[in-house]
Amino acid sequence: MRKSLLLLSCLLSVSFVFAQKKNFIYTFYGFVRGDAYYNSRNNVEAVDGNFYLYPLDKEPDADGNDLNNNPSSTFYTFTTRFGLDMTGPNVGSAKTSAKVEVDLGGFNLANYLLRIRQAYVNLSWEKGSSLLLGQTWHPLFGDVMPDVLNLNTGSPFQPFNRSAQIRYQYNNNRFTFTGSAVYQLVYLSAGPNGKSEEYQKNSILPELFAGVTYHENGFLGGLGVEAISLKPRVQSHMADKVYKVDERITSVSFMAQAQYKTGNLFLAGKTLLASNQTHNAMLGGYGVSSIDKITGEQKYTPSRHSTTWINAVAGSKWKGSLFMGYSKNLGTTDKLVNPAFFFGSGIDIDRLLCVAPGFSYNLPHWKAGIEYSATTAWYGDTNLSNGKVINTHAVTNHRILGVLIYYF
């Protein structure tokens, strides 16, 4: 905790000291946020429950009682955020800018720790080109996101990820074209050794994205395609022998998004045909489709999910909102060897549904709101012939969230 406060003090001190520097402009921003929530059962979650995803499956004890049927409630303030936007002197004909954004959400069991959310530099040219280098939002998070109170921002239906990347954009009046090469560090792909950056490192290749958006008179629509190629293992163990193996799993995902703003009305939605998107806090992963009997080298097949969310928000001072998300497991391309050789998140869920109405009171620099979400997951058994989930049963979590935010 002391280290976090020291780093935060240094950040604030640097911003004030360098604000005197010629040809630089510094804008400091942030908020203090408190989250109080109640869950009716245990869930898959992160950041000590503040980043909520979906309910855990039933786990019967010796008497048949569900060990995951445990309500819980608490109050936290560690998502408090600080940021610094900077603009500086031109580099040739390029305008320069940078961002550093942190919060206290990178913590262990003993401390809240200062963590980097965003840190990048950006070069932009008058003819519409820009080049960003550093950590910022994943391109599948995109220009369209739901306006909700929960910290998860619509996950696991909305891709959620901030990663280091090299991003080029070209803006031509109403159209923006984007190309990105993305590298993992915090938000990681699943594999034989759990979630790790080693699968992409060994692959050499960055995650690639290409997309286009159209924007005019409050409307924005966009399409995108993403490809990721991983190496799950570089060696195998068979009959007390070690073999060097050349394994790779490559998958492609597609995204469409749209939003419309007019007056006090906001409408938005996004749909994805998602393949192996565990690094984006979504359902899915990949499984083993075959194993070489001599070397143990494995081939893999990705799971595919159809995922869609819609969001409507109305009002200004008093705001009402409704979020709905739905995800469906479409199975795998090839047969699976064993359900135990399946790496991912929610791979035993056939479909997932969330309905979340919310209400907030908004003043300059203040927001107070409450949001209720009912999330139902249909768990079952994996069909080895196609990777789909069968023999399902439903599990529901009821979550009530209260939020108070002071912006500065």
Image (spheres, helix red, strand yellow):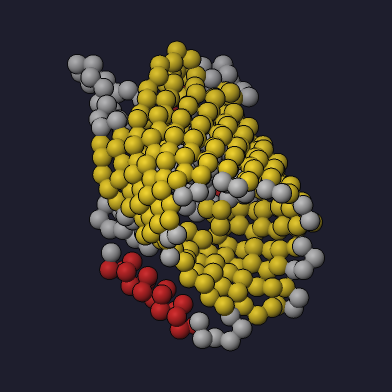
347 to 22, vertically: above or below: above
Expressed as whole percent of the image width and height from the top left, the position of residue 198 reads 51, 49
Expressed as whole percent of the image width and height from the top left, the position of residue 96 reads 65, 73
Instruction: Name the residue: 30% across, 30% down.
Output: 41
Expressed as whole percent of the image width and height from the top left, the position of residue 268 reads 60, 40
Residue 224 visible in the picture: no
Instruction: Name the residue: 51% across, 31% down.
Output: 324
Instruction: Name the residue: 44% across, 21% down.
Output: 378
Q: Nearer the viewer, residue 183 or 155?
A: 155
Q: Nearer the viewer, residue 292 or 345?
A: 345
Q: Nearer the viewer, residue 15 or 288?
A: 15
Expressed as whole percent of the image width and height from the top left, the position of residue 136 reads 56, 57
181 to 321, vertically: above or below: below
Placement of the N terminus among the 4 image quadrants: bottom left
Q: Residue furthest top?
A: 391
Q: Is residue 66 left or right of residue 191?
A: left
Residue 382 visible in the picture: yes
403 to 128, vertically: above or below: above
216 to 125, vertically: above or below: above
